[in-house]
Amino acid sequence: MEWAHALNGNNAILKVLDQLMRLTSADAAIITRTSKTERQVKYIARCCIQEGKVWPSQPQTQTEFVLGNCIYTAKAGSIWKLSDVKATDNASTYSYRDQHPNGLGEVIVVPLETKGGHVDHLELHYRHRPKSYDLDLLTVLASTLASGWRRRVPGSISAASEQVRRHRLRVVQVDGHVPILDPQNPTELSRCEFRVCAMMKEGMTVKKISETLSVCPTTVRSHLSSIFSKTGASNQVELLHLLNRKTEARHKSTRSGISHSG
């Protein structure tokens, strides 16, 4: 029901994806769209169980590795597993030993839609092999997830995907600095996102921010995901670096001026 509501614009896709990740005991979840002509991947939504903590980066798609030559033809609602790549030589054009993604015990890919000029996939990442009952649950849910995706409001996913892509292009600047908290708000953060950035710069954790704003941690993580898309940061460490970079540059300039005057 939550999945259907999100695909009809009545709920946030990221929030429902987070719920699905936790329901299936996954460590990360991703929805991607791959162009058949350009072979470019766009992230529609992604989240991880460690989001809000210091984590190396946001989860990266493994769909092409898992599906190989079947990436454009796999049946919607079917289940594909990383472990099958090791067991079947013809499952992928890649070498399992050379290309196996580090830190992942299993990746489950569910094709959501394969018609038209693009293909959409749901990925669930596990650091360790999932329990059998989690796999059974996914088997039951897969066809329903694909069916709901097929019946979504036309254009809703394309709009979300283009929004993320536009944000990432907009923040590239010649001097390499992204003045995120500048009064002109060049990265077009919402009021809530701006407040989250300001609190993060002060050293506040996701938990503390959620308590201060009187919202749940999931809401803060949702804001962070949007902030990452708009600023080009891939995790909190990079975001903190961007938030403090302008201040550091000014500080160095000031010290340099004092030195020269002396």
Image (cartoon, rainbow, N blue to C red):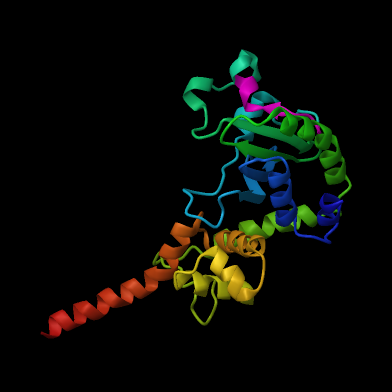
Q: Is residue 189 magenta?
A: no
User: Seen in the image, is 39 located left or right of residue 113?
Assistant: left
- Which residue corresponds to the image point at 45% horizontal and 71% vertical from the top-left? 201
- The relative height of residue 61 versus residue 230 in the rendered view (above or below) is above
Image coordinates for residue 35, horizontal then vertical, percent: 69, 41
Q: From the viewer's perspective, is residue 39 above or below residue 163?
A: above
Residue extending farthest left: 262
- Give the side of residue 123 with respect to residue 230, left or right: right
Q: Where on the picture, by quarter, is residue 143?
A: top right
Residue 113: percent from left, percent from top: 79, 39
- Report the residue at 41% width, 67% height from top: 177
Q: Quadrant of the C terminus?
A: bottom left
Q: Is residue 190 visible?
A: no
Give whichever of 214, 39 is nearer the camera.
214
Q: Which residues are magenta?
A: 76-85
Q: Position of residue 255 (x, y in %)?
A: 21, 78
Can you say whether 11 is above or below 103 in the image?
below
Q: Quadrant of residue 130?
A: top right
16 or 248, which is in the foreground? Answer: 16
54 relative to 245 in the view: left or right: right
**What residue lies at 84% left-to-right and 61% top-to-bottom?**
10
- Residue 255's place in the image compared with 112, above or below, is below
Say which of 247 and 158 sits in front: 247
Report how many numbered discs are placed on residues in the image: 0
Q: Residue at x 64, y 48 (%)?
A: 42
Residue 142, quarter of picture = top right
